[in-house]
Amino acid sequence: MYKKYRKKIIFSVIFGAAVFLGLSIYANFDELLEAFEIYNWLMFPLVLLLSLCNYMMRFFRWEYYTRTLDIKIKRKLSIMIFLSSFIMSVTPGKIGEVFKSYLLKEQNGTPVSKSAPIVFAERITDFLSLVLLSMAGALMLGYGTNLIIGFGVFFVILVLAISNKRFSYAVIRFLEKLKFFRKLSVKIHTAYDSIYMMVRFKELVVTIILSIFAWSFECFSFYLVINGFGAGNAIHIDIFIATFVYGFATLAGAATMLPGGLGATDASITGLLVILSIPKNIAVASTLIIRAATLWFAVIVGIISVMLYQKIYQKNINEIVLES
């Protein structure tokens, strides 16, 4: 599993460097350096701390999901597995986070088909919470409202479809008529039973609330980043507008299914800031700082966690052989 995605992670790092180069050319490299010089770097540790708060809330959501599915796992091991999956943050659509399921199976024998739907449920609640967070800023700006509502409607319909057993079982029966899916019949039923349990009303409300808190931390960190250029530069963005910019850009990046939203999220943040009359060099500098503190910081946390996991549990990630 890890070997399968290692090349994709390396490609994403190279792609990320290309995005950095492109944005630097767009902003004019010398002017970009000037923007970095005037930034209040004393805020950066707080921005990283807010990212950690985001991870903590998402871990609580992961714990809630594992309890919902009656997956028994010790808290210390659970958090190690959860953080280790961050190494896959730059895989397309974050699908590499199914890595959590492979580690779970290695540790306690939980079938991948039972736990993998957690990643799908996480993406659903991420999207819905970002839609809710972004809406206020979208209404204030009068920009992107239709797209955000469209995202929201799509995922509400998706949840309603999944929570309707009659409809879902009809789809599964249709798929079972196809030769490829017929071989996976048991796993498909197991996966559906898991996702159904996670989108029931109570479970959905709890996890959306946790997701709103999680993404609020990162939206606030972006607010601190952009306003860190304020001294003597008259740069200021309202918290609702900052939330909209970050939330909308994150949704746009996720919708492209690009690794970590690379390129799409970065361009969206920069473009929206320029529309708000923020100078290009400060817009690009803000984008690079927030992406370093969220996406790339998560990858670093994932790398450290994988190293600790291998040392503590005497497991070599490269040698884990599991069902694909």
Image (tube, rainbow, N blue to C red):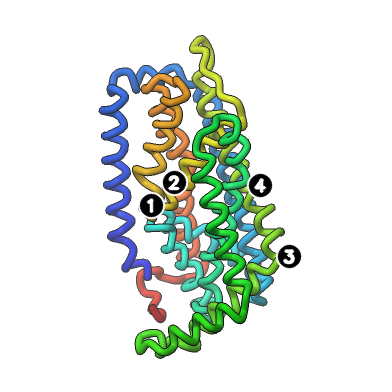
- Per the rendering, the mark at residue 213 is 4
Residue that badge 1 annotates: 256
Given the image, on which type of amino acid does mark 4 rest? Phe
Counting residues from the start of the chain, the first of labels 1 and 3 encountered is 3
The residue type indicated by label 3 comes to Lys
What's the mark number on residue 252?
A: 2
The mark found on residue 202 in the picture is: 3
Mark yes or no: residue 319 visible.
yes
Q: Residue at x 55, y 65 (%)?
A: 158
From the top left corner, tell me how far across and down residue 132 is, in percent: 62, 46
In x, y percent, where is residue 232?
51, 9
Q: Which residue lies at the image location 47% right of the left edge and 49% below the top edge? A: 298
How far is the residue under mark 4 from the one under mark 1? 24 Å
Cβ–Cβ under 8 Å for marks 1 and 2 = yes
Q: Residue furthest top?
A: 232
Q: Is residue 76 left or right of residue 148?
A: right
Q: Earlier in the sequence, mark 4 or mark 2?
A: 4
Find the distance from the CA under tag 1 to the CA under tag 3: 30 Å
Three-letter residue code for mark 1: Thr
Q: Within 10 angstroms of label 4, few (less than 14), some, or many (20 or more) residues?
A: some
